[in-house]
Amino acid sequence: MDNKVYEKQIRPGIIAVRVMIYSVTAAVIVLVISIIAYLIIKGLPYISWEFLSQAPSRLNDTYGVAPMIINTLYIVLITLVVSLPLGIGTAIYLAEYSKPGKIVAAFRFAIDILAGMPSIVYGLFGLAFYVNALKIGSGSGSMLSGALTCALIVLPTMIRTTEEALLQVNPTYREAAFSLGASKLHIIRTLLLPCALPGIVVAVILSIGRIVSESAALLYTAGVDYTMPTNFAKHIVEPGASLTVQLYLYATEGGVPEWVPYAMAAILMILVFVINLTANIIAGLYKKKVSLS
């Protein structure tokens, strides 16, 4: 077939596909910007220092988010402390040490199944195991039981994302390091992990977003208490509502001014942005330190 005839036949299809891709991309961008702008417009004007620094009180008819912000940070930090070593360690084993076989294939399949499991199932498991069986904290939940449940939720995503990042590292790097006499552990620590750092950061950011946005699981495991913690060391075994849980309760139960849920949603969005930015900065500093050494 003549090339000119072929180009005339194929070009309209290519143009149509490009138009569709650009249209879908533009629609998604517009949708995201619209949601962010809507929350900022509806919630940002009501955010004040009093709203950020005080606890809500039905008696005084005042509203605040300080306890919920503290509870959210507790859950995020404890979850990352638990899930990061487990997730990265499991990913390193799957990518570098495991041999292809039925057991490893079944393990990967189980991870994929767990990644798609509804969070309410994790919440019921956390309630039955951490809260009722292990008696972590009080009977109404605790920061630790909520964080351990969130660790189960984010582990599948963290394992698979980190494993893919490790597998994407150029195999010639490994071969060159082995030829120089480097040990497996030394290669992983000084070569593979720094090269896979962008993928690991993506896994951390996805995990943080999942933790902060979680409500169903934390409703059962962390509790709904919104009083200000008095002892930050003991608060790890005390119940407390996260921002999303309290936002869900305000939105569903009502009884609060309309602006309160919107202000909390705007704070939640800003908090996610700040945490993700901090994770990127820390990862950048670590990568720079490794490259200099």
Image (cartoon, rainbow, N blue to C red):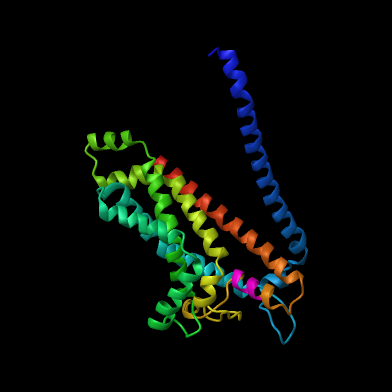
Residue 218 place in picture, x, y as percent:
52, 73
- Is residue 237 covered in magenta? no
Residue 118 place in picture, x, y as percent:
49, 65
Residue 36: quarter of image? bottom right
On screen, 228 above or below 119?
Answer: below
Q: How many marks?
A: 0
On screen, 30 above or below 45?
Answer: above
Toward the front, the furthest residue is 1
Residue 168: quarter of image? top left
Left or right of residue 53: residue 74: left
Residue bounds of the magenta highlight: 244-249
Q: Quadrant of the C terminus?
A: top left
On screen, 139 above or below 36?
Answer: below
On screen, 154 above or below 23?
Answer: below
Which residue is drawn at the image coordinates 63% and 63% (left, top)?
268
Left or right of residue 192: residue 55: right
Which residue is drawn at the image coordinates 51% and 83% (left, top)?
140
Q: Nearer the viewer, residue 292 or 230?
A: 230
What secondary structure prevails in the magenta region?
A: helix
Left or right of residue 194: residue 205: right
Residue 68 place in picture, x, y as percent:
60, 73
